[in-house]
Image: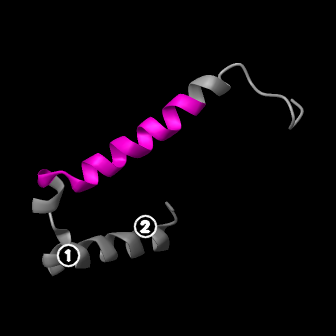
Amino acid sequence: MNNHQKSTFHPLGDFLNPALALLGQGLIKSPIWQKLDFSNHPYLCKGLIVLFYKQKLIGFA
């Protein structure tokens, strides 16, 4: 497809992109996500870092 041509689903994408962006902003600002503050849990962060390095060493990522 030429870069200047629009696909059939282009109007759908024009609608969904802003809607998904607003949904994401709404979820981030919701009280549920504000209660789940993972920065206050260093053991969780440490576990995620260890898991990340193990995956890198094994070759999954």
Say which residue appears at 24% left-offset and 79% top-offset. 46
Residue 57 in the image: above or below residue 36: below
Q: Which residue is mark 1?
A: 39
The residue segment tinted magenta is 14-32
Say which residue appears at 74% left-offset and 24% top-offset. 7
Q: Amino acid at mark 2?
A: Gln
Q: Position of residue 4 (x, y in %)?
A: 87, 35
Q: Position of residue 23 (x, y in %)?
A: 34, 41
User: What's the magenta bit mostly, secondary-structure-wise?
Assistant: helix
**For the residue labelled by badge 2, is the local secondary structure a helix, a strand or a loop?**
helix
Q: Which residue is mark 2?
A: 55
Query: Which of the labelled discs sits on residue 53, or is there none?
Result: none
- State the scheme by which the image is colored: one colour
Q: Residues within 10 Å of mark 1 (few under 14, many from 20)?
A: few
Q: Amino acid at mark 1?
A: Ser
Q: Position of residue 61 (x, y in %)?
A: 51, 62
Q: Name the foreground residue: 15 vs 52.
A: 15
Q: Position of residue 37 (x, y in %)?
A: 16, 67
